[in-house]
Amino acid sequence: MSIFTSANILLPADENKENWAVVACDQYSSAPEYWDGVYERVKDQPSTLHLILPEAWLNTEKGAAHQARIRSNMEDYLQNDILKLYPDAFIYTERTLANGLIRQGLVGTLDLEAYDYHSPSDHPIRATEATILERIPPRAKIRSQAILEFPHILLLQNDNQDLLFQRIGAIKDQLELLYDFDLMENGGRIRGWLVEGESKALIESWIDEYESAQHAINPASPLVYAIGDGNHSLAAAKAVWEDIKSNLDLADLGDHPARYALAELENLHHEAQKFEPIHRILKHVDVDHLIASFNQVSAEDGYAIEWLSHDQKGTIYLDSSISPLPLAVLQHHLDAYLDENEGEIDYIHGEEDLTALAMQPGNVGFFLPAISKDSLFETIKNDGSLPRKTFSMGHAQEKRYYMEGRSLIDHQK
């Protein structure tokens, strides 16, 4: 049986899908004004905003009031035909990004029995980055109370030839186009096609072919898929499933809805997949003391990491024998330093933003090189999950927007 399969998928019945789809809840977490603007736009119209909790609103009165309404909003959407069911189907998607590239995806369910967020792991589905365990309980609480799921989870396959999506693209004219619209807030354009019947069976055979090939590489510990985005949300789903599973009879395990999670499958090697480095900035530190604390090696034996502060800049050389990843060496030192000294760390997308922050007195920014996506799966196999905030799959507006949903109370996948 495949790890990634079809699902009973819910989509909005209304034509106004522009207000329905909002970006992943963990984006713009330091910009509540972004989410306030989205709220002003959609107001009381059907929208996934009313079914998810933006992290920018966490620990606020607005967030608490919003979260308290999520369950009733889900019930309302089910009872009043806001959602339309597409049973036993995939949704094939094409996302046109600001740079003109088209990112292909396939929405279906993954089997949580095949997933493990711990590191190291021998499960077929693994996290790409370290999971912060304390982030799981609040997400698990939300999921345990939900009757619907609308995920921003991206599941990555390691297909150098891009066979699956080339094949799907070749038959898309045979599929029914379900939606085609511009995403709000410069999110690009999204199109989605229904995959059912004979087309679904054909795609299932292609998925089986890929999964079998990955198992054959290392039958004892195959790495078939990796989580590109939404790992903490998926970890919460896993935690809820483990809790539910402990109280089930063996006969009920196979078709319980909590065993599965909706996700969008994408190919790591597609040209539209861009990996952006996530830089580090330390604030309110003694810059000279911090830079002097590094145990540097020669340029020939080390990773070169450029740094910038208010009135100085330079390059440090970190011991490359510690880890194959420059970030891992840097992060370990920064964590250890902050355990003993004052200061705080933040994670910054974009060199311009990092430069602006680093120019403030008491701050120092570290410019990280981009990770090669070609080495991602091999690194996870050999070393386990990467350090937290190692890379970003595109910019915030390019993250997945909530679109498809699935029932968590209907005993079908």
Image (tube, helix red, strand yellow):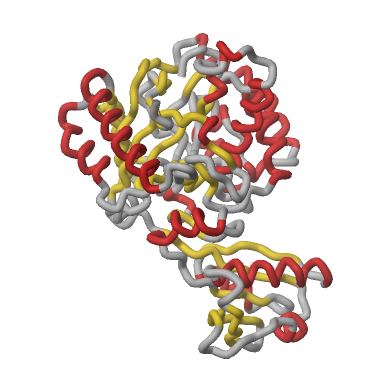
Task: Indicate the position of residue 172 as horizontal and vertical percent values.
Answer: 20, 33
The residue sitting at 22% across, 25% down in the picture is 199
Q: How many marks?
A: 0
> Is the residue 312 above or below the residue 324 in the image?
below
Task: Indicate the position of residue 281 as horizontal and vertical percent values.
Answer: 64, 70
The residue sitting at 49% across, 38% down in the picture is 152
Task: Indicate the position of residue 248 as horizontal and vertical percent values.
Answer: 64, 14
Task: Indicate the position of residue 250 as horizontal and vertical percent values.
Answer: 59, 14
Q: Where, quadrant-wise, is the N terminus in this rendering? A: top left
Q: Which of 155 and 40 lies nearest the eye of the viewer?
A: 155
> Is the residue 65 above or below the residue 132 in the image?
above
Q: Quadrant of residue 378?
A: bottom left
Q: Which of 22 and 262 lies nearest the eye of the viewer?
A: 262
Q: Which of 189 and 260 lies nearest the eye of the viewer?
A: 260
- Whether residue 173 sits left or right of residue 309 in the image: it is left
Residue 396: tell me if it is visible.
Answer: yes
The residue sitting at 49% across, 29% down in the picture is 111
